[in-house]
Image (spheres, grey):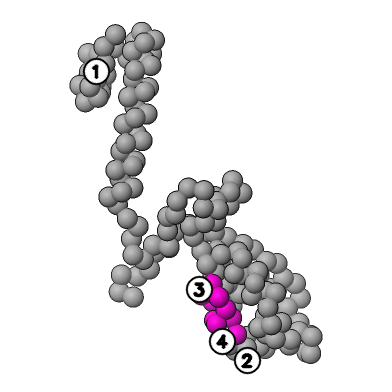
């Protein structure tokens, strides 16, 4: 049994001089698989140690066992975005925007709050998007169950809702890129 160093083996296989992997004896294949596994793990560990995320990236790493789950593998490492997709009749767009303007600042002081955007369609759709970004699902839930959320949504109880339907979407932020000039 003999092990072959990776570059010569690759060169031999690429030029047709060496034996293709499927024709190698089983013991050499086992060595090849083990070698590739060790090489891959070592290379990944070195790359992770030497290359850190860009300062403008939202990707943040944490130690294994820090709260990720198969359902939300990035739950421990990245922000979440909540989008409330609200159907608003076009003739009530201005009223919709005014209601948000009148409660400005309520969400920005919440623990874990990162960003807010109110989007109105500039095409023929009638779905406005209320986007908030949070450090974690727990921070979002704490805000929803808190007094500022109730106060900010009191207009619905007093004047009725502007929208005719709404749907809450939830996303993990996997990557974020900002303008270099920002």
Label located before the other in sequence (3 or 2): 2
* Pointer 3 local density, CA inside 10 Å: few below 14, some 14–19, many at least 20: some
Q: Could you tell me which secondary element the residue under label 2 belongs to? A: helix
* Pointer 1 local density, CA inside 10 Å: few below 14, some 14–19, many at least 20: few
Residue receiving disc 2 = 102
Label located before the other in sequence (1 or 2): 1
Q: Is residue 115 magenta?
A: yes
Q: Nearer the viewer, mark 4 or mark 2?
A: 4
Answer yes or no: is residue 108 visible.
yes
Residue 142, position as x, y percentages in the image = 64, 72
Task: State the mark number for residue 4.
Answer: 1
Residue 79, position as x, y percentages in the image = 51, 63
Residue 165, position as x, y percentages in the image = 75, 72
**Camera-side residue: 43 or 63?**
63
Residue receiving disc 4 = 105
Residue receiving disc 3 = 114
**Residue stretch rendered in magenta on the structure:** 105-117
Residue depicted at x 34% and y 20%:
32
């Amino acid at each position: 049994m003999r092990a072959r160093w990776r570059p010569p083996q690759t060169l031999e296989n690429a030029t047709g001089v060496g034996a293709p992997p499927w024709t190698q004896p089983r013991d050499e294949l086992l060595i090849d698989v083990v070698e590739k596994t060790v090489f891959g793990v070592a290379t990944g560990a070195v790359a992770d140690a030497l290359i850190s995320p860009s300062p403008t990236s939202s990707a943040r790493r944490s130690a294994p066992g820090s709260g990720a789950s198969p359902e939300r593998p990035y739950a421990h490492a990245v922000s979440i975005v909540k989008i409330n997709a609200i159907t608003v009749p076009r003739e009530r767009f201005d009223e919709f925007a005014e209601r948000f303007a009148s409660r400005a600042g309520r969400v920005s002081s919440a623990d874990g709050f990162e960003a807010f955007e109110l989007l109105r369609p500039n095409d023929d759709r009638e779905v406005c998007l209320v986007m908030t970004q949070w450090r974690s699902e727990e921070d979002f839930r704490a805000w929803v169950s808190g007094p500022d959320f109730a106060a900010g949504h009191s207009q619905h109880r007093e004047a009725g809702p502007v929208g005719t339907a709404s749907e809450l979407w939830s996303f993990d932020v996997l990557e974020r890129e900002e303008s270099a000039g920002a």
